[in-house]
Amino acid sequence: MTKEDKAKEKSAQINNALGVFILFFGIVILIATTHTSTYIGEMTNLVAGLILCTIGAGMIIKSWLTIKKLKTNNQD
């Protein structure tokens, strides 16, 4: 494994952890939607929660694919 590959893997692991945090935070905001008293507040929380969940899930998937690619390349 080259030095560049190690740096990419470390970056992917950091992005994975950050993605989990953002996804969790998005889920918390989605749950908070049920405790909002106004319609505009509900819609704001819903949209913000969905955006954060999408970003978090995207980061997790991208990091998994990067790590899988690096491991596949190193087996060759």
Image (tube, rainbow, N blue to C red):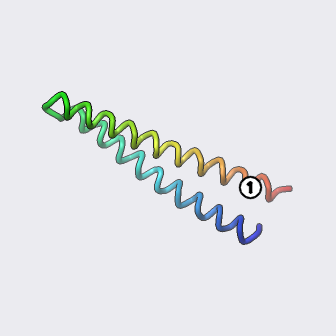
In the picture of the structure, the residue carrying the numbered disc 1 is 71
| Quadrant where the image shows the C terminus | bottom right
Residue type highlighted by circle 1: Lys
Density class for disc 1 (Cα within 10 Å; few <14, some 14-19, many ≥20) is some
Q: Which residue lies furthest to the right in this view?
A: 76
Q: Is residue 32 left or right of residue 72?
A: left
Q: For numbered disc 1, what is the local secondary structure?
A: helix
Number of marks in picture: 1
Instruction: Please give the name of the residue rendered at 71% of the width and 64% of the height, measured from the top-left corner.
Output: 5
Instruction: Please give the name of the residue rendered at 54% of the width and 47% of the height, measured from the top-left corner.
Output: 60
| Quadrant where the image shows the N terminus | bottom right
**Looking at this view, is 29 or 75 the one in front?**
29
Residue 6 appears at what percent x and percent y? 68, 67
Residue 32 appears at what percent x and percent y? 24, 38
Q: Quadrant of residue 43?
A: top left
Q: Is residue 6 left or right of residue 21?
A: right
Q: Residue furthest top?
A: 39
Vertical comparison of 3 with 8: above or below: below
Q: In which quarter of the image is residue 48?
A: top left
Residue 44 appears at what percent x and percent y? 26, 36
Q: Is residue 73 left or right of residue 43?
A: right
